[in-house]
Image (cartoon, rainbow, N blue to C red):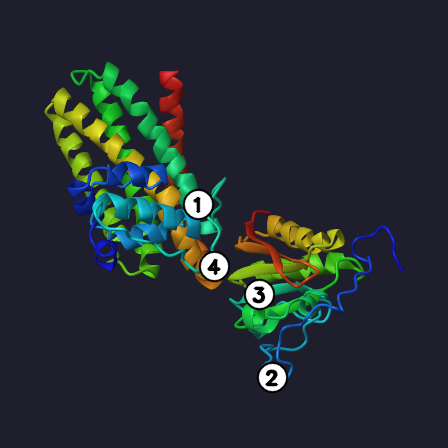
Amino acid sequence: MECGCPGSKMMDRRDEDSGDDPTVAVKSQLRQWPIQLHLISPEAPYYAGADVLLTADCVAYAMGGYHSEYLKGKSIAIACPKLDAEQTIYATKIQSWFEDAKINTLTVLIMEVPCCGGLLHLAKQALAASSRKVPLKAIVVGLDGEVRSEDWVTA
Amino acid sequence: MEALLNRGIKQIIDEHAEVGPILEAYGIGCVPCSVGTCLLKDIVDIHGLTAVQEQELMTKIAKEVYPDRDIVIPLREDTAPAQGGELTYSPPIKKLVDEHAWIKRLLAQIPAVIEKLDLSSESDRRLVRDMLDFIRNYADRFHHAKEEDILFKYFDENLDILQVMFTDHESGRAHVRAIAEAVETQDRAVVCEHLTAYRELLTEHIKKEDEILYPWMDKELSDSQIGQMFSAFADVDVAFGDGPAKHIAFIETLEAASS
């Protein structure tokens, strides 16, 4: 079903060659649970002083190398800025990462569809409101799983 | 060709003067460098040229150095994009670039200060002492301390490019000492000579850092190192309290007085 929203626009890429050997096992780099932003506590020990990855829900499905290239060595939370409810809680938790968990860096990984920008906006708002500043990086991922841009951003 | 890549750039330029303008055409300003011990291969690597640009540059240099040989430079496999357009920096490196902006504003005032300088006047001697106070405490202790004690520690400090930076810092300190002594003896010629030399040195030094060294360092540092460095810089800012703000206010006063 087609509609005007780029985030919901249908795309069929089944004819494209995946290029990979499907028999190769990829080790998970996830080192914590839970991961959904409503469920996590910003004061959980794995966030203290960590490099944190805030990932839009769809990203891990789009990127082939998500675990090895981005998740490895980082702590994580996931969220959907389009569908999730009560996002003021998200802003509070992100700010708590900066101020209470004293995280080292925050990287926000989002899809290129416009609605995904809301997650970066939340992170910027939380950083602007925070008394403690931290480097914030935005990585935008295309629908083909390739990185469109990777930039340090200011709140 | 391997032998050429492993030679010091100053030596190559001394023997083949045309190599200087060739490098400059690609934004590589080694000719006025105060040290020039960097190897050609490191210089080509650090300037972030595209594979095609690097092939063109090396072909031109090879023709200049070996005019009788028909050397074919292969296209590098790595096709990393060239640094073009506006330079962007990670947050801690951006902090250093912003501090450079204040140092450049002091450097911009030096010609006007020299023009009217009368060292028999107590107010002019105080003006020079205040400028030295800015250089010693803002440019050197506050800013260079972040570079030398934090940023450079993430790299091999024996790298030629870092040795050039250390040498520039030491040369700057020598100019400051000479100015401080000459102010007290009211030796106008020496004060003007060293203020001018300091301005020239720091102008080139900051350009090298902003346009070449920092972008290269940003590429080399991991996100985690960027975070650690940002935090360490914040600690320095806290330790210096309102000192830097007073030095910035001095620059604004100096600019207002000369306008």
Q: Which labelled disc corresponds to residue A52?
A: 3
Protein chain holding label 3: A
- Residue B17 in sight in this render: yes
Whole-angstrom CA distance, mark 2 to mark 1, is: 43 Å
Q: Could you classify mark 1 by the number of other residues whose Cα lies within 10 Å: few (under 14), some (14-19), or many (20 or more)?
A: some
Q: Nearer the viewer, residue B62 or B148?
A: B62
Q: Could you classify mark 2 by the number of other residues whose Cα lies within 10 Å: few (under 14), some (14-19), or many (20 or more)?
A: few
Protein chain holding label 1: B
Q: Which residue is mark 2?
A: A25
User: Left or right: B141 with respect to B226?
Assistant: left
Whole-angstrom CA distance, mark 1 to mark 3, is: 22 Å
Q: Which residue is mark 1?
A: B95
Q: Secondary structure at mark 2?
A: loop
Protein chain holding label 2: A
Residues beneath discs 4 and 3 located on the same chain: no
- Residue A43 in sight in this render: no
Give the residue type at disc 4.
Gly
Q: Nearer the viewer, residue B235 or A15?
A: A15
Residues beneath discs 4 and 1 located on the same chain: yes
Q: Which residue is mark 4?
A: B227
Q: Quadrant of the N terminus of chain A?
A: bottom right
Give the residue type at disc 3.
Val
User: Left or right: B86 with respect to B239?
Assistant: right
Q: Secondary structure at mark 4?
A: helix
Q: Secondary structure at mark 1?
A: helix
Compare marks 3 and 2 and give the one earlier in the sequence: 2
Residue A8: x and y in percent read 82, 58
